[in-house]
Structures are given as structure tokens and as C-alpha cells.
Image (cartoon, helix red, strand yellow):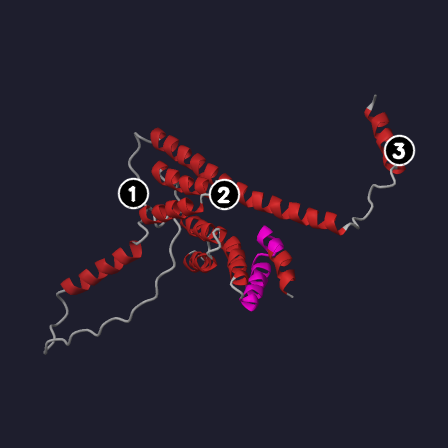
Amino acid sequence: MSYRALALVLLVSVGCSPTLFTPVEDESEAEEMKARILELQRQARVSEVELDRLRRQVAELEARVAGGEGADRPEAPPPPALDDGVGREESGSSEVIESTDIAPPAEPPSPPAPAAAEPEPVAKIATGPLSPAAQEMYDRGYTFYHRGLYVDAESAFQQFLAAYPDTELSDNAHYWIGESRFARADYTGALAAFQETLGRYPEGNKVPDALLKKADSLARLGDVSGARDAYDEVIRRFPASAAALSAEERRAEYR
């Protein structure tokens, strides 16, 4: 049968079917469709994390290949360390102390006033590939979580952060600690973990999901007003995200 004939048969079939394109009137069917959409969104977020892991592995392999090809070339200068600014400040302070063209003071200088305590700086997220040991430790916690071993998952992510506190997966580890606590109905502990994710990594990729789960934690703790505000923030800041769609669904429950 040719494609033209097949298309004609399909058009006739569609025209004869009285049920196609009928609006969904059954409320239970509509609820089932919503539940399927939310489950697909959850699976998409899990797939996104797994895709990030695969991308990092590819980047690590490319870096290794590039390093092997350039073995005979002059060694490039090392990249600046994360605390390079601090090193420069210390170096500059040393130069001022050793300067000889400044006249000594007539009187001994008074002791400097104690510096005011500074707020904890926002953590920097590294962009380079993780070492195999770091990736293995992170994957261990991730596997525990998806097997429902939430206590083991939290412990594994805590160990990862203790060993590798400033990596591209540090914000993810904090987030999954919150998810592990939330799954155990420890909503106070979960809220603290999600707040830490938002506070330490405001530019991290887990901000939309952490903000959504912060709202869920507040709702479970009875802070309906705070939950509504957090849902509204997700919708306002990340309108095109899956987290925003979930926030709209859950926000409707607290009108």
C-alpha cells in the first residue's frame, strides 16, 4: 500500500471515530494524567543529574587525552587557585612591612583594633572534572538514595562533602542530603539542608529544586504562608522550569 493510500485510510478512520479529540471530562482521569506528568518531571530531574555525571566523565577523558598529546610541549602555567585573592592580599601585606622608604613612627604604634567578624563567604563551585575517587564517593550516595537507603545516602553525601568540600557537585550533595531527610519525614533537618544549598550556592544548578523542596518542607511543618511565598518565588524566578510547574500545582493546594 502506498503512503498516499495509507494516509487516506488513516484520515477516514479518524473521521469515523466519535471519541477522538473528546475533552477529558472524567475527574479521576484528569488526576491520573497530572500524576503521570509529575512523575515524568521527577524522572527528568533524575536523568538530568545522570546526564551531568556522564558529561563530566567525557570532559575528564578529553582532558586526559589532551594532556597526553601535549606531553612534549612546554608546561603551561598552573591556573590560579580558588583562594588566589587571599594569597595576593598576604603578599601585598608582606611588601608593606618590608618597605624601607617609610619613616619609622616617633612613638610605638598602638595595637590594631580587632577586625570585625566577616560573614561566611559564598562557596565557589569548581568547574573542572572530579577525580575518579570523588566521583565514586558521590555516586555511592546517589545510588543509596535511589534504592531507598536514605540514612546511608545522607552519610555518604556527608563524607563526600568532608573530603571534597568545593567541587561542582557540592551543591548537589547538599541538596540530596535534604532529600534524604525529607524522605524520612525529618522536615526540620531537610529545611536546614535546602536553606544551606540556597545560601552557599546561589548560582548552582540545584537552586530551583532546592527552593521547591524548601516550600514543601515549610508546608509539612505547618508554615503555610512561608510555603506559599517559596512557591511563588520558584514561579517568579524560574518560570520555564519543571520546578515552577510543580510549584504551581502545589501552590493551588494552599489558596
Give the Cα separation between the discs numbered 3 and 2. 45 Å
Which residue carries the number 3 mark?
12
Q: What element carries label 2?
A: helix
Residue type of the residue flagged with mark 1: Pro
The tag on residue 77 is 1
Identify the magenta region: 223-246
Q: Earlier in the sequence, mark 2 or mark 1?
A: 2
Calculate the distance from the C-alpha at mark 2 to the C-alpha at mark 1: 33 Å
Along the line of sight, the residue nearer the viewer: 163 or 89? 163
Marks 1 and 3 sit apart, C-alpha to C-alpha, by: 71 Å
| Residue 8 coordinates in the image, percent (x, y) | 87, 30
Q: Is the magenta stretch mostly helix, strand or loop?
A: helix
Within the magenta stretch, is there residue 232? yes
Where is mark 2, residue-wise?
A: 49
- Does dot 3 land on a helix, a strand or a loop? helix
61 relative to 42 in the view: left or right: left
Q: Label 2 sits on what residue type?
A: Val
Placement of the C terminus among the 4 image quadrants: bottom right
Mark 1 / mark 3, whichever is N-terminal: 3
Q: Residue at x 12, y 65 (%)?
A: 100
User: Residue 178's spot in the image, x, y percent?
Assistant: 45, 53
Sort mark 1 into few (<14), some (14-19) or many (20+) by Cα contacts within 10 Å: few
